[in-house]
Image (cartoon, rainbow, N blue to C red):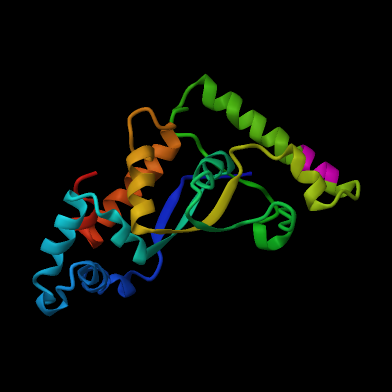
Amino acid sequence: MLERSFSVEIEGKNSLSNILENLERYGRVCYKSEDKINKRSSEIFIKKIIENKHESVLEHEKITVRIICDRGVSHEIVRHRIGSYSQESTRYCNYSLDKFGNEITVITPSFFVNNEKLHIWQEAMNKAEEYYFKLLEMGASPQEARTVLPTSLKTEIIVTYNLREWRHFLKLRTAPQAHPQMREIACKILDEFKLLIPIIFDDI
């Protein structure tokens, strides 16, 4: 069994350079003010759009993020309806194969730190792996054997939202009451977005 932590990667960062200019071009159609478009005005225009809660304009552009997390967190992510998802499938992935290192990979919960709870969790993960491999050895298919896999199982998921939905997602998932692991991931995404296009996310 391999333990690892979550990770976040923004896909196609280079393609995000024109987002603000594109949004200004789309948004100015509403006011027929296309003659005012220039690169220096895009941030000002988008800031006003957000302040005026005219966020439908933000739906014209999207960002895709590759997230490695546990299955429990991925279940929270896919509850967001306006999005596209491609996720590692436990129906088709056979973790006994060489390409998976002949082991399951689990995401270590950050809230179990060097204590008895962490030890119990590790024991449970090892048992889940043991029984998963036993079922495979007995002829069970991966989709049958997966029934004993834990919520902490590592998964990779590609998430695409438009900018308005990312704002909604981040407002919910960075809140203090969000699940601790979900909040860690959301805060990491928010930090990345603030570096890439701060004008859209700085108010979150």
Which is nearer the eye, 169 or 52?
A: 52
- Picture quadrant of residue 151: top right
In the rendered image, the quadrant that contains the N terminus is: top right
In terms of depth relative to the viewer, which is nearer, 24 or 20? 24
- Quarter of the figure with residue 178: top left
Q: Between residue 86 and residue 61, name the one nearer to us.
A: 61
Q: Residue at x 19, y 46 (%)?
A: 203
Question: What is the quadrant of residue 120 in the picture?
Answer: top right
Q: Residue at x 33, y 34 (%)?
A: 175
Residue 61 seen anywhere in this rendered image of the structure: no
Q: For the stretch drawn in magenta, what is the main secondary structure? A: helix
On the image, the x and y values in percent for residue 122 come to 60, 31
Name the spot of residue 112 as percent of width and height, x first.
Answer: 47, 27
Question: Is residue 134 found inside the magenta-colored segment of the image?
Answer: yes
Q: Is residue 18 left or right of residue 158?
A: left
Residue 97's spot in the image, x, y percent?
73, 59
Residue 185 placed where, x, y %?
Answer: 40, 45
- Say how many tags the image has: 0
Most extreme residue toward the right is 138
Q: Is residue 18 above or below residue 113?
A: below
Does residue 197 appear left or right of residue 111 in this picture? Answer: left
The span shown in magenta is: 131-135
Residue at the spot 44% in from the left edge and 28% down from the top edge: 111
In the image, taking residue 29 as reference, residue 7 lies left or right, namely right
